[in-house]
Amino acid sequence: MISNMMDEFFSTRPWLVCCRSQIEAAYGLLEACFASGGKLLVCGNGGSAADAEHIVGELMKGFLRRRPLGPEMRRKLEGVDAERGAYLGAKLQGALPAIALTGQYSLNTAVANDNGGDLPFAQQVYGYGVPGDVLWGISTSGNSGSVALAATVAKAKGLRVLGMTGAKGGKLAEYADVCLRAPSDETFEVQEHHLAIYHFLCAALERRFFDQ
């Protein structure tokens, strides 16, 4: 199934064929995380912060599929409150647990003010991360200090690390179990490649866990 999806993906984006083995490895890392009950933590700065939020948005609700709740959960919801449970059962969608570390404004500004401006992601990885989770760090250069510090904590706590960088990989590639290196080092081009790659990964994971 995934192989067929990849063939279709690369048929329209031949410039990313060089990344095929990396994308396959990234899919395997994320699929194993979610299949075992783990969660995904995602971080990046600037445009990569927007990408982190975007990834979480695609995973935590329906992307290309509706992801309806199963009958057992619908019954449980209705068992708590018949009217509200029926509403929730009809409206909620299946989710793959993911947290964007970029959006915790009160926590992040407190950490930056009290401890150091490069520590907000690392602090959250320390607080949220457990073995079986994955940290997805995004840095177009691969050398973002705050992302590298988060990756350091992730490795120390037994998380797997998925890096997403430009062609050179930078420091983040040294920490990553899998590193998705876009075939460019021009920031805007790297970000355009990243968008295509993470949309593919989100679609593939959705099909794996929510195929109807």
Image (cartoon, grey):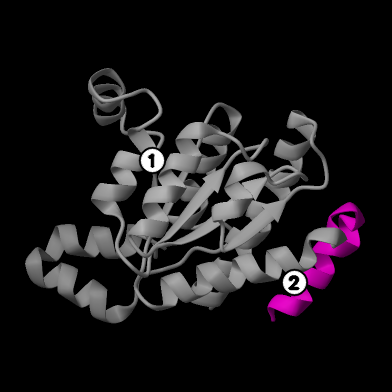
Q: Which mark is residue 5?
A: 2
* Along the line of sight, the residue nearer the viewer: 90 or 191: 191
* Along the line of sight, the residue nearer the viewer: 78 or 169: 169
**Majority secondary structure in the magenta region:** helix
Residue 187 can be seen in this image:
yes
* Along the line of sight, the residue nearer the viewer: 11 or 91: 11
Whichever of callouts 2 and 1 sits on the residue coming sooner in the sequence is 2
Amino acid residing under circle 1: Leu
Residue drawn 17% across and 68% down?
77
* Along the line of sight, the residue nearer the viewer: 130 or 73: 130
Point out the image quarter for the N terminus: bottom right
Q: Which quadrant of the structure image shows residue 18?
A: bottom right
Residue 95, image x and y in percent? 39, 62
Q: Farthest residue toward the left?
A: 80
- At label 1, counting other C-alpha atoms closer than 10 Å, the crowd grade (few under 14, some 14-19, many 20 or more) is many
- Mark pair 2, 1: CA separation: 29 Å
Question: Which SS class for mark 2?
Answer: helix
Residue designated by label 1: 101
Amino acid residing under circle 2: Met
- At label 2, counting other C-alpha atoms closer than 10 Å, the crowd grade (few under 14, some 14-19, many 20 or more) is some
Q: Which quadrant of the structure image shows residue 61?
A: bottom left
Drawn side of residue 73 relative to residue 28, left or right? left
Residue 6, image x and y in percent? 77, 70
Callout in the foreground (2, 1): 1
Q: Which residues are magenta?
A: 1-16
Residue 174, image x and y in percent? 60, 53
In the rendered picture of this protein, how many numbered marks are placed on residues? 2
Residue drawn 52% across and 30% down?
45
- Magenta-colored stretch includes residue 23: no
